[in-house]
Structure formats: structure tokens, C-alpha cells
Image (cartoon, grey):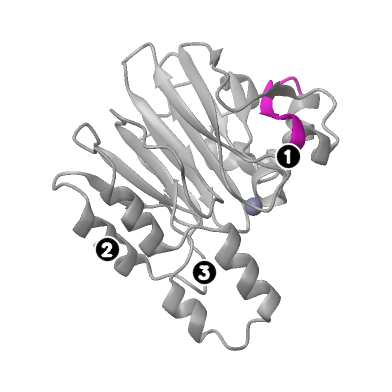
């Protein structure tokens, strides 16, 4: 299974999961046009899209994608917040299937109606991927995970020094997004013996440092795991452009 980032920031998020039999979009926080441009694919090349929550940087084109015929999965709360009448509604802990992918949504912790993360198992190659973004922490440990795609939003020391930031904004960040040391503590509690790749998602422009984040994560996970910071925009990963 391959994970590819098309865009990853508070401006817009979109990722591709592909096991060579099934290709899905995770998030659609970009215009339809931009999704096509960045991925090199048209909508008919995707089997479905999964949306974690209703914020625009994750769900911008959800309604449009549905109207163009793509199946878009999201929680009931997210669908209600987006007025997405034709969404395929899913629930935490209720497994569903898209092509060769078995997907179990799980609860995340964010200021959204009913946000979800996704645990995705490929029946094609057996790989297990966990995807969690926009969440202050995580409750699950994903035994046997091969690919982790997880938010690393900000550094609490940089946030503390950002005096110009309104108190409200500071409070919101600290209570809705994943701090780098929180992530490292979480990673230390995981069994990562089967993990090959860790993708760090949704880094804050002003409150993160890419290299420091990579070093911090590298220090707490087993050697040999590839750590990738997903850029604000553009491809990273090995999605092959087979049309
Ligand atoms: Zn959000």
C-alpha cells in the first residue's frame, strides 16, 4: 500500500492511498481542479474519498465530488455540518469496505462535529495504515501498523513565545491539534516493529520546525523507519502514475 501527500497544511489537505487495486482520496480540502492537477488523476481514477471532518481545509470540494459521482464517506455529524445530503455516512468502529480496502473509522479529538481517523487494511497486500489528523491526542494504538500518517502540528515552546497570537487562537491550537511532544510520547507507547513509514501531516507554518520534528520523531521510534514530513503542497511518496 502506498500513501502519497498532495497537500498538507491549514490551507488544504489531500492524500492518496493506493494498493494497486484500489485508489482512494483521503480528504478533499482543495478545489476539484487542483486535486486533478496535483494528483495527475481524474475523479474516475478514484474509488472513493474519505473525509475526516467538515473544516474547509479537509472538505472543501466534498459536495462537488459527490455531485460529480464520487462516493464520499464521512460521519453523520460531518455530513450534517457540510449539508452533504448524498454523503455515505460511516460511524466510529463500524468497518466498511471500498474495493480491496477494509476501513475502520475511529474517534479523534478536534473542534468539529464528529471527527474521525481511519485505519485501513489492504486485502491486496496485507498492509495496515493508520491516518489521523486534526486531533489533540489519540486513544488507539494500532497494533501491526505498517504505515502511520499522523498530525504533527505545532511545538508548545514556539506557541508559548507567539505573544502576538490572540489568546483565543492560542487556546484553540493547544486544544484541537497534535503537539510534537504529545506525538512523540504517543509513538513511544506503540509497538512499531512492523512499521515502515511515518508521515507527519499538517505542520503549522508558524509553529513548527520541519527538521526538529523529524529529529524528535526519529529519536523515539525504531531505526529503519522512513520519516517523511508532508510538504504544504506537492507530491511526496511513491504514488505511481499508472493510468
Ligand atoms: Zn480542522
- Cα distance in 3D space between marks 3 and 1: 23 Å
Q: Position of residue 129 (x, y in %)?
A: 39, 30
Residue 1 visible in the current orientation:
no
Query: If you read the primary sequence from the N terminus, does the residue marked by circle 2 or circle 1 appear first?
Result: 1
The quarter of the picture where residue 213 lies is: bottom left
Above or below 171: residue 110: above
- The span picked out in magenta is 68-77
- Quarter of the figure with residue 208: bottom left
Instruction: Please name which of the two marks, 2 or 1, marks the residue nearer to the observer.
Output: 2
Q: Nearer the viewer, residue 191 or 55?
A: 191
The quarter of the picture where the N terminus appears is top left
Residue 143 vertical placement versus 47 (above, below) = below
Regarding mark 1 in the picture, which secondary structure is present there?
loop
Question: Badge 3: few (under 14), some or many (20 or more) residues near its Cα, within 10 Å?
Answer: few
Secondary structure under badge 3? Answer: loop
Q: Are marks 2 and 3 in contact (CB under 8 Å)?
A: no
Residue at 45 percent across and 56 percent down: it is: 231
- Whether residue 74 is in magenta: the answer is yes
Q: Position of residue 131 (x, y in %)?
A: 46, 38
Q: According to the image, label 1 marks what residue?
A: 61
The residue singled out by tag 3 in the image is 205
Horizontally, residue 188 falls left or right of residue 90, namely left
The answer to the question of whether label 3 and label 1 lie on touching residues, with beta carbons closer than 8 A, is no
Question: Percent from the top left, x then y, of residue 174?
Answer: 56, 67
Mark seen at residue 216: 2
Crowd around label 2: few <14 · some 14–19 · many ≥20 (10 Å): some
The stretch drawn in magenta includes residue 46: no
Label whose residue precedes the other's in the sequence (3 or 1): 1
At x 51% / y 32%, what residue is drawn? Answer: 118
Amino acid at each position: 500500500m502506498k500513501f502519497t501527500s498532495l497537500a498538507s497544511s491549514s490551507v488544504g489537505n489531500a492524500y492518496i492511498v493506493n494498493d494497486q487495486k484500489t485508489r482512494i482520496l483521503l480528504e478533499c480540502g482543495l478545489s476539484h481542479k487542483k486535486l486533478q492537477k496535483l494528483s495527475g488523476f481524474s475523479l474516475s481514477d478514484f474509488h472513493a474519498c474519505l473525509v475526516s471532518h467538515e473544516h474547509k481545509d479537509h472538505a472543501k470540494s466534498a459536495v462537488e465530488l459527490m455531485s460529480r459521482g464520487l462516493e464520499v464517506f464521512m460521519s453523520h455529524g460531518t455530513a450534517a455540518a457540510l449539508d452533504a445530503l448524498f454523503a455515505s455516512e460511516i460511524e466510529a468502529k463500524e468497518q466498511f469496505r471500498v474495493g480491496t480496502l477494509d476501513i475502520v473509522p475511529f474517534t479523534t479529538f478536534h473542534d468539529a462535529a464528529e471527527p474521525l481517523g481511519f485505519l485501513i487494511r489492504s486485502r491486496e497486500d496485507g498492509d495496515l495504515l493508520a491516518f489521523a489528523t486534526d486531533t489533540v491526542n489519540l486513544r488507539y494504538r494500532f497494533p501491526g501498523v505498517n504505515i502511520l500518517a499522523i498530525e504533527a502540528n505545532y511545538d508548545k515552546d514556539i506557541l508559548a513565545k507567539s505573544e502576538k497570537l490572540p489568546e483565543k487562537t492560542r487556546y484553540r491550537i493547544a486544544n484541537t491539534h497534535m503537539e510534537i511532544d504529545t506525538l512523540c510520547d504517543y509513538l513511544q507507547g506503540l509497538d512499531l516493529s512492523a512499521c515502515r513509514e511515518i508521515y507527519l501531516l499538517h505542520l503549522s507554518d508558524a509553529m513548527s520546525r520541519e527538521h526538529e520534528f523529524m529529529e524528535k520523531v526519529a529519536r523515539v521510534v525504531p531505526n529503519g523507519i522512513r520519516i517523511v514530513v508532508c510538504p504544504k503542497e506537492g507530491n511526496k511518496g511513491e504514488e505511481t502514475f499508472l493510468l
